[in-house]
Each structure stands twice: as C-alpha cells, then as structure tokens.
Image (spheres, coloured by chain):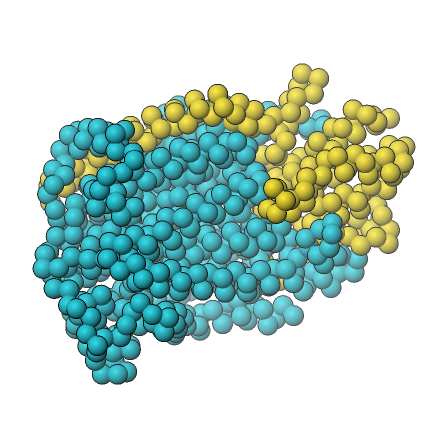
Amino acid sequence: MASVFSRERTLLDPFLCPIEKLIYRATRVAPHEEMDWKEYATAFIFFGLVGTLLLYFLMRLQRFLPWFFGAYQTTPMTPDLAINTAISFSTTTTWQAYGGETTMSYASQIAGLMVQNFLAGASGLAVGVAFIRGFARERTDKLGNFWVDMTRALLWILLPLSLVGSLLLVWQGVPMNWHEYTRATTLEGARQTIAQGPVAALEFIKNLGTNGGGFFNANGAHPFENPTPFSNFLEMLTIVLLPAAFTYTFGRMIGQTRQGWVLFCAMVLLFVSGLLLCGRAEQRGNPRLEKIAGLSARAGAKQAGGNMEGKEVRFSIGASVLTAVVTSNGATGSTNSQHDSYVPLGGAIPLVNMLLGEIVFGGLGTGLYSIVMVALVALILGGLMVGRMPEYLGKKIGPLETKFVTLYVLACPLLVLPSTAVALRTRAGLAGLVTNTGVHGFTEIFYAFASCFANNGQSFAGLNANSAFYNTTTAIVMMGGRFALAIPALALAGLVAGQIRRQETSNAVPTDAFLFGGLLVATALIVGGLSFFPAISLGPILEHLISR
Amino acid sequence: MKKNLLISVWMTLVTTVLLGILYPLVVTGLAQVLFPRQANGELIQANGKIVGSRLIGQPFTAAGYFHSRPSNAGTGYDAANSSGSNLGPTNKALIDRVAASVEAAKTENPGAPIPVDYVTASGSGLDPHISPATAEFQVPRVARVRGMSEADVRAVVAKHTEGRQFGFLGEPRVNVLELNLELDATHPLR
C-alpha cells in the first residue's frame, strides 16, 4: 500500500496506469498538484456530499429503473429513509433502517449502494494516507492530492481484491445473477419465494471497504450472503486485512516500521481480549433458558450448544462471536448473528468496541488515525505526569495540536450520549422499542447511536429505526462520526506537517516500545471508561445482574 | 472550492459507470461461466419443479420429515423477508416461546434432552441446517412414521452431515432439505 500511495512501481501498473490517466482526463484532475489540509478536507467533504445526493436520487427513483420488483420490495423509499441510507453509505456506516430484499431494487443495490461502498472506503483510505503524510513530512503544508489518493486506492487496492474475492464467494455459494425472485414449491407443497440477486459483487466490497450493509435484511446471517464457514472466514479476514496492514503502511511511510508494529500489537491485544470475553459469555448460554427443564445447551460431540437464539448452526458460537468482535472493531457491522439476542455481557463487547472509537483495526484509513489520536492522548497525559512537552515521531504536540486532539476525543460522548438521552425522553424515540423494553430497550437505543457514530452500522435490530425520528437523528450522528473525526485529524496532520522532524531527544517518551503500547491500551480503556461507564452500567451490566 | 466541487461531480459519474456498471458485468460474466450452479442460488429441482434452494431452509411440519429450526423470517421461512427474532435475552416473550417449543418437543421424544438449536430461532430465519444432536433427537419419530429402522434413518442422516469445513472451520451440521429429499426418494411417506 505504501508503494501505491507513494507512486512507486507496482506489478499492476501496466494495466492500471492507462485507466488512471483516463480517469484524471475525464474528471479534469491535475494529478501533480498537492493540497493543503483545508483543500484536502474540502475535496473529501464535497465528494461525500455529491455521492450522497446521487444515491438519494437513485433510491428515490428506483421504481422507474430496471430490476425493481414491486411485489416484493414493499417498504416505500420515503424521503427520510432515503436520505438516512444515502448518508449512511457515504459515511461507511451502512446503517440499515431498511431491509435489503424488501426495500432495494437491484439497481439501487449495485449502482447505488455498492458504488458508495467503494467510494466511501477509498475516501477513508485517502484521508488515512494524508494523515500519515502529516507525520512523515516536514516543513510543508501539503498533504497530497485527495483525488489521486482516492483513485489509486480504488484501482490498485479495492478493485482487484474485490474482483478475486467476489468470485471466491460465488464459489462458496453466494449468488450473482439478475433474476427475479424465484418461486419454489416446498416439499410440503407450500409456496416459497426465494430472493436472490447480484449478491456476490456487493458482498465482498461491503467487508473490504469496512461498510457492512448487507444485501439482505439478515446481513451476514443470510445463507446467500454467507453460505459456509469458509465464506465467513474470508469475509472476516477481508474486514481486518486492510486496516491491519495499514499500521505497517504507516510504519513504512514514516520510515520507522517499529512504530507501526506497536500500534498493531495494541490492536491485537484489545481484539483478543474482546474475543475471549464475548465467546465465554455466549458459550455459557442464556441462564433464563437453562432453567427450562429438558433443554440442553451444553456443548458436546453433536452440538456446539451455548446461546443459539439468533445464531446459525453452521457458525454456532465460535464463528458468530468471531464475527461480532471483528465487525464491531472493524467499523463494518456486517453481522452473522443477531446481537440483540446475545446475553447481556456478550452483547456488551461489540458495544464497548464501538465506543472505544474503532481503534482496533477500525475503518479503512479511519482506524489508523483513530489509534494515533489515542496514542497522542496517551502522550499528552504522560507528558502532564512527567512535566514534559509531548513529542510523537519527532513532532511536538503543542497547545494547538492538543486542542484538535481534545476535539477529537470529545466528539463521541458529546454526540452519542445526548442523542440517546433525547431518544429516551421523547415519545418518537421510545416508539422504536417494538420488540424489547426496559433495560434492554435502553441498550438498543444506546447501541444504535454508538454504532452510527462509530460509522459501524450494526444494530440491536429489535429497534424499529425506520421512522422520521431515528432516520434524522442517526443521520446527524453518522455525519458527526465521519466528519467531526476526519476534519480534526486532517487539521492536525496539516499542523504537524509544517514542523521539522526533530531527532528523537532523550527527553521524549519512546513510542516504539512495549511500555508505550501498554500506556496506549490503558489510555483507550480509561478515556472510554470515563465517558461511557455510567451508560454501560445502566444497560448491559444491569441486565446481566437481573438475568441471573 | 468550485474546482473541487466540479471534480466531485465528474468523479462520481465516472466511477459510477466503472464500478456500478462495468465491474458488476464482469463479475456476473465470470461467475456465470466459472460457477453457474452457485451463481444461480443452488436451486434444487424435483420432478421438473423447483422445490427450493440447498442453502435456504424451509418449514416442515409433517411428522415424517425432519423439522427445521423455529424461524422469524416473515411468517416463517419467508425467503424474501429474512430476519431473526431480535428478542433480548431477558425478554419474557423469548423465554415463553422457547418453553412452549420445549414442551412440544418433549411429546416427540420423551425423556431425551432437547438440543438448544431445535428450540431457538436462527439469525436469518432461513437456516438450512440443524445440529447433528437435533437430527438425532428426531430420528425415532421419523423412523416410526416412515416405518424404517432407526439405524437406517441414522445412516441417511450421516450421509447428509457435513463436518467442519477443511476440518477446522465452523460446526458440524445436517442439511434438512437434502435429508428429507433423500428420505422421500428412498422411503416415500405413505
């Protein structure tokens, strides 16, 4: 990846360079002009905006376009649902207030949603690259060219991987056709309408671009999206692949790969802890169900057991929990089980992962600047403790830089907590609780806003989110989660790019060591804990205590 | 400002043609040539009629068939409306529903422990599989109704049991539709 963005030679150049040139000519991009952080941010925002508008009109007009099956696609594409969905896809959230097979035509799915999966993913990656350049460069205000970074991310990284990956998924059983829904007659003579469609093309990029909006309502639990354990494994690998590799890209672009590895190790530590905790909770099963005489949820040779409500037999606890942890960390939200039915502590893990700010692998590009931001908080705190001006990679983190970091850290609690409170205090907000109420209902609402802010998009799906209230509020939170984080990150990158890179002084905290990794993890947990512990204890922790 | 806005518009249009039209055409073409069965949803035909898809579960109520798991897709196994129950772990509706399913299952095979997947709904509502334990639980009933020995039924179940993929991925499972199709073919319901 570092080669792609530094315009070094790569294997794919002979095929892709001509296409790249053609795109620049068609769109009048001057590929060698570099941008300062303000222009870069402007281009990023405009591109998101135009994509949102196009998507909005595509969906509103879908009934006039081909592949719209009115008999089955019965949920109307209202203006509020369309704008919510458009924003959610252009911010890589892919929050699903709609159900794929009952709402979206094939044209909307492919020319609309799938294209945004590519574009929003590539844009995020571009911002991540610009952020790295801020630390890698010195005495400049230029961070690169957004259009070039975005185009190269598309052509060199997302498109080739998606082509191969989609075909692998088809091999495993994911459909790729344009037929109308199939009518079958079951063995017992009942009618069954089977929704299919061009699933595979969308399925792969939804994970690679860390978007996560499924073709079907049940997302990755649907056998056509995720037919086998191998397809599941592949989809999970896809989510982690680029964000994890990006830490190495970071290390290479700043010329110190150890720095990248520290970030990677901190991510892995948080990831594995979440996996173990969630797996243990789910495998122990639901205590209330276990009280029913005659029921056996214990793992044995013939069944995996555990809390099976909302889970598929082919995945059972192991692959379901792995997916829950991967998608909640990877800002993706492509679940293969219904998190709403997880036991309280099991469901708390994805929630906590999202509230930590998508720092464990995280979204494309966004994950990296998120964890660097937390690293900066750790340095600022460390600097306060020992009374030194914090430095990162030879760049001083002065008062102005600290302000942007603070802005970044405060954005999440400032948006998520008030919007949850508003939903709880209004009739329109409470009207969403159609399936569960009480403590679990609170968690559903809190989860929704946390997920939207994290640009994740998974949900406790018992919440009926297709209402004017939720379509509007979640859209605002999603935009906050995208832009209120990307803009401070770019601004910070612009600031530090102007500094010279000092030689590491003996005064500075070494940031390529084990100790700093520990400080980083601790800071993430402390900052997240201080912001959200009260809300988490009102939700999953309280429900856990009363479920015994 | 204005320059970047214009580029945004052009870039969106160009990439929509590339990714929204050309790319899906290429994937469709390759998929249909390389994996035609999978690309079209692994539909199963019997007597010239489509009876379902290998990957999509369907409801079975007759005592002679192996039954699928409870489903919350539409009114049950509606393959155009996938969904789980989304009932929270402490929701009384969930506890009552499972308790009722357990009571019903007890009459089929008294005394045997009831596997958890037999009385819980899947995430998609379209789970085509049951666990080997759930298949085993139903063997006596199916054997009785079809007039087969339990050992014969077990042999058919074993034939349709998939192990872990490549030996380590996922969980062992039994495909209900394929199992019932084979039973119908070899030991038709009277």
Left or right position of B81 against A3: right
- Residue A546 position by quadrant: bottom right
Is residue B178 visible in the rendered structure shown here?
A: yes
Q: Seen from this angle, which residue lies furthest top?
A: B48
Say if residue A402 shows up in the picture. no
Q: In the rendered picture of this protein, how many numbered marks are placed on residues? A: 0
The reply, left or right, for residue A251 in relation to residue B85 is left
Which residue is pictured at 13% across the width and 59% down the height?
A138
Please state the horizontal and vertical placement of residue A337, each as a whole percent of the image.
55, 49
Write down the quadrant of residue B56 in the picture.
Answer: top right
Residue located 23% across and 57% down the image:
A254
**Quadrant for the C terminus of chain A in the image:** bottom right
Q: Nearer the viewer, residue B121 or A103?
A: B121
Q: Is residue B50 left or right of residue B20?
A: right
| Residue B138 pos. (x, y %) | 80, 43
Task: Examine the rendered structure and indicate whether residue B189 appears above or below residue A354.
Answer: above
Q: Position of residue B62 (x, y in %)?
A: 79, 35
Residue sitting nearer the eye, A342 or A76: A342
Residue at the image point whose x is 81% and y is 36% from the top: B155
Chain coloured yellow here: B
Residue at image x 71%, y 62%?
A290
Q: x and y percent of residue A439 in the render? A: 54, 66
Q: Colour of chain A?
A: cyan
The relative height of residue B2 versus residue A387 in the rendered view (above or below) is above
